[in-house]
Each structure stands twice: as C-alpha cells, then as structure tokens.
Amino acid sequence: MTVVTILPHHEICPEGTTIEVNPGENLCEAMLDRGIKIEHACDMSKACTTCHVVVRQGFDSLEEMDDIEADLLDRAWGLEPDSRLSCQCIVANEDLVIEIPKYTLNHAKENH
C-alpha cells in the first residue's frame, strides 16, 4: 500500500488526513472513494482543472504528464512546478504528500 498524506485544506479536508492507496489507483478516485470530496467538475475527463493538486513529496514517482494536462494546468489557480491534475495521476509505490490549492477556477460548486 502507498500512503498518501493530504495536507489540511480549509474546506475539503480541514484537519488533513492520510489514506492508504493501492499502486495503480487513480489519485482523484482514491480520494473520492475515501471521503475526500475534491472537486472534479469534468468528471475526470481531463477537461478542467478543478482536481488540481500540488505534489509536495513523491512527484517523480508519477508518470510524466502529457501535453493536454500540461496545457490545462496553465489555467489552474496557484500553479506550481509540482502541480498535477489528480484525475491523471496513477499512484505508484512511493508515498505521496499532496496539497489541494485553496481555490479552483470553478465558479459553482458541483456538490460531488
């Protein structure tokens, strides 16, 4: 099992948390399955940036992003060098520490 530490987010995960994820699982789906209600307005079809995360530890264990993800991330609020769309991250064997940015470009909550 891979340990994914989610740093505190004022709304989604106020205390922060740690989840165990099987290698090969999609990061966004794993968080949703474990009660972390990260936004995913495009239903994980790689068409928005609402599931944007910053990978604070373990970034290099993730597969390289493709050009579509990189272009989308250019529109994300709070973009950093270690930013990824969580819907495009497949968890490997290395533990991860992620931060969910304070804001998204989504103007309406989807209540997912």
Image (cartoon, rainbow, N blue to C red):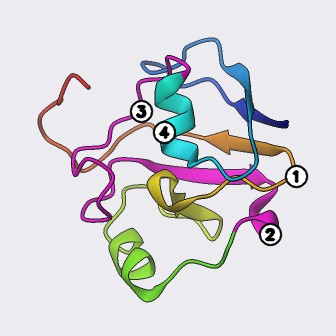
Kindly identify which residue carries mark 3. 38
Q: Residue at x 32, y 64 (%)?
A: 46
Quote the CA–CA distance across marks 2 and 1. Answer: 9 Å
Kind of residue sitting beneath label 4: Glu
SS for callout 2: helix
Between 40 and 103, the one lying in front of the other is: 40
Q: Secondary structure at mark 1?
A: loop
User: Principal SS element in the magenta part?
Assistant: loop
Instruction: Quickly name the residue at label 1.
Output: 94
Contact between marks 4 and 1 (CB within 8 A): the answer is no
**Mark 1 is on which residue type?**
Glu
Q: Quadrant of the C terminus?
A: top left
Q: Is residue 73 above or below residue 25?
A: below
Residue bounds of the magenta highlight: 34-62
Task: Find residue 12 and report its horizontal and vertical position in percent.
Answer: 45, 21
Considering the numbered disc 3 on the image, is that residue within a helix, a strand or a loop?
A: loop
Packing grade of label 1 (10 A; few <14, some 14-19, many >=20) is: some
Which of pointers 2 and 1 lies earlier in the amino acid sequence? 2
Real-space Cα separation, disc 2 to disc 3, in angstroms: 22 Å
Q: Earlier in the sequence, mark 3 or mark 1?
A: 3
Quarter of the image for the N terminus: give it.
Answer: top right
Q: What is the x, y in percent for residue 73? A: 41, 70
**Other residues around mark 3 within 10 Å, as few (<14) / some (14–19) / many (≥20):** many
At x 32% / y 48%, what residue is drawn? 50
Q: In the rendered structure, which amino acid carries the disc numbered 3?
A: Ile
**Tag 2 residue:** 60
Res 89 → quadrant: bottom right
Please say if the residues under marks 3 and 1 sit with CB atoms less than 8 Å apart.
Answer: no
Residues at marks 2 and 1 touching, judged by CB atoms closer than 8 Å: yes
- Expressed as whole percent of the image width and height from the top left, the position of residue 61 reads 80, 65
Relative horizontal placement of residue 71, taking residue 7 as reference (left or right): left
